[in-house]
Amino acid sequence: MPWPRTLVLVRHAESEGNVLTADQRAEYDIGTHEYALTERGRKQAEITGQYLRSAYGVFDARYVSYYVRSKETMAIMCPNEKVYEDPRLAEAQRGIWHTMTGEQIALTYPGEVVRKKREGLYHYRPWGGENWPDVELRVHSFLSTLHRDYEDKSVVIVVHGHWKILFQRLVDRLSIEEVVRRYDGRDLGGELANASVTTYTTDQSSKRPRLTFAGTVVPWEGVI
């Protein structure tokens, strides 16, 4: 079976960036990769960690990006366990949209506003940043690692929102139009919630085993 037996994607718990508007984040004087968890986020991670231990026991491997919010989430969920840090798991880089408000960009680079609207959410690559196909290349590369190294193993990954939806596009074979619709309308039934748990499994009896979506839960929902 050339895939993990169980693959669990946990979106990082609530961070400082999640409680700010886009313009507030642009004026916040730290890099997006340095956003720490909020107190609510720490509680989310604790509850989700309890759920993971109950549902899956100890995983064979644990992965995070180099972002503080990703590492803090994993440290709370799986304390004192070996964790691999992988830059391919990083969130999509938004370039100038990380450091300038919408009004500043409209005044300084009006052509960027026009280009973003014309090219659309999936294709638009901001100055200094990535578009969604760029992130998909990183997802493809990481899928190769899972395929090569974790046959019949259990793996948990703390992921970011854009990364997760593009992972699902590739694995679940969704169209570009479908993922844009879901992301733009946040129409994912909890799959983009902070500290949500999305599980994929592999059917060992299949002649052509592949990762198959098994569901999403939000363990802390209704608790905090």
Image (cartoon, grey):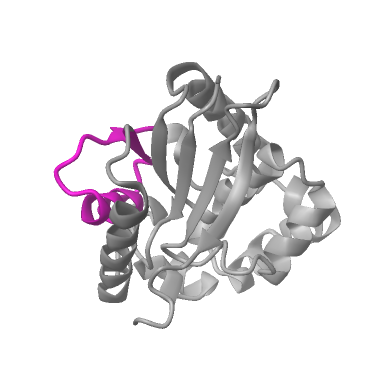
The residue at the far front in this view is 205
Is 74 in the magenta? yes
| Residue 182 image offset from top left, x and y in percent | 72, 62
Q: In this view, does 107 lie above or below 62?
A: below
Residue 56 is situated, as x and y percent measured from the top left of the image, at 36, 47
Q: Please state the extent of the stretch shown in magenta in the rendering.
A: 61-86
Is 204 drawn above or below residue 108 in the view shown?
above
Instruction: Name the side, left or right, on which 137 lies relative to 39.
Output: right
Q: Position of residue 161 (x, y in %)?
A: 54, 55
Asked whether, in this view, residue 62 is left or right of residue 139, the answer is left
Q: Quadrant of the N terminus?
A: top right
Q: Residue furthest left?
A: 80
Residue visible at 30% across and 67% down in the picture: 47
Is residue 221 or residue 27 the one in the foreground? Answer: 221
Name the residue rendered at 46%, 25% in the picture: 152
Q: Does the magenta stretch include residue 40?
A: no
Viewer-side residue, 189 vs 72: 189
* Quadrant placement of the C terminus: bottom left
Q: In this view, does 60 lie above or below 13?
A: above
In percent of width and height, residue 154 lies at 40, 35
* Residue at image location 52% in from the left, 53% down from the top: 198
Q: Is residue 143 visible?
A: yes
How many marks the image carries: the answer is 0
Q: Residue pushed farthest top?
A: 148
Let me know if residue 131 appears in the view.
no
